[in-house]
Amino acid sequence: MTPPLTAVYLREMLLLKHRFKRQLLSMSVSPFLYLVTFGFALGKAVTVGEHGYLEFLIPGLIAMASMTQAFAIAAEINSARFYIHAIEEFQAAPLSSLSFVLGETMAGLTRAFMAMCIVGALGWLFGVRPHYGPMLALAAFLNAFAFSSLAVALAMVLRTHADQALLSNFIITPMAFLGGTFFPLDALPSWAQKILTLLPLTHASRAIRADAFGEPAALAPFLILAACAALFFLLALDTVSRAKD
């Protein structure tokens, strides 16, 4: 008998397998365009500290990919809620809120891992060879876990599938461009830097970039990411439990 947690995860993996090639292509388009437009257009003329712009950009794209693809699990949950009503089946089954949230979060982590591998492969094709160490993997994992949990939490409170676009427009897209992905935040005014330190992606970008550069990573970004991951996971548990009631 398949454990409930595994059943939730396998459902998402079967959906991913069904459109695997299209998913890979979709995950590749944005980072490829960013590397071409920003990397080739600016890469040869711009340096960030002692590093070329492409070297600076690749870790930022890894951080962004781990966020966007982990959060994309919300769209799958919304489809299950509003179109095929699979969520009602999960609610009727002997499935705990913890198993459901963990299963969906693991699915988001899997998507994020695929996207990060694609960014790394594209970086290799563009001649960028960053350092891939355990601290980079830890930062990416915490970032993906946080946004996958947030996706589950928010997906369970949306009233229509169309609201999914609002989440992306008001949460994910601004964070993707302001979280230290494309430019160093040190160039911004101090008040802007303080505001942007509230974004989890800012800390993920810093931690991932530090390890990619072979530099020692500060402890603070990992603690903040871990706190966000725990908070969002508890929020997801709460929203799923409320949806059952």
Image: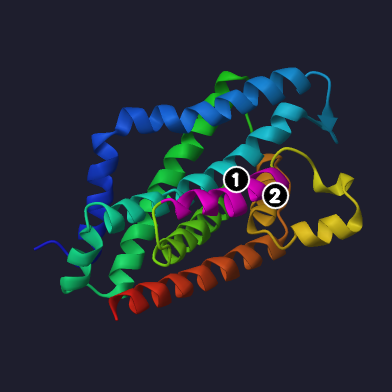
Q: Secondary structure at mark 1?
A: helix
Say whether residue 180 is visible: no
Q: Is residue 167 magenta?
A: yes
Say whether residue 109 is visible: yes
Comparing labels 2 and 1, the label whose residue is closer to the camera: 2
140 left or right of 130? Answer: left
Residue extending furthest toward the right? 189
Q: Quadrant of residue 6?
A: bottom left
What residue type is disc 2 on?
Answer: Gly
Disc 2 packing (10 Å; few <14; some 14–19; many ≥20): many
Q: Quadrant of the N terminus?
A: bottom left
153 left or right of 78? Answer: right
Residue nearest the viewer, comparing 232 with 116? 232
> Which residue is at a point 41% across and 61% down the rendered structure image?
155
When the figure is inspected, residue 21 is found, relative to residue 132, above or below; the finding is: above
167 left or right of 7? Answer: right
Disc 1 packing (10 Å; few <14; some 14–19; many ≥20): many
First reached walking from the N terminus: tag 2 or tag 1? 1
Q: What residue is disc 2 on?
A: 179
Q: Is residue 193 magenta?
A: no
Q: Are marks 2 and 1 in contact (CB under 8 Å)?
A: yes
Q: How many numbered badges does the structure rendering display?
A: 2
Where does residue 100 sit, x and y in percent of width and height? 30, 66
Q: What residue is disc 1 on?
A: 63
* Region in magenta: 162-178
Label 2 – label 1 distance at C-alpha: 9 Å
Q: Quadrant of the C terminus?
A: bottom left
Where does residue 192 sit, x and y in percent of width and height? 84, 56
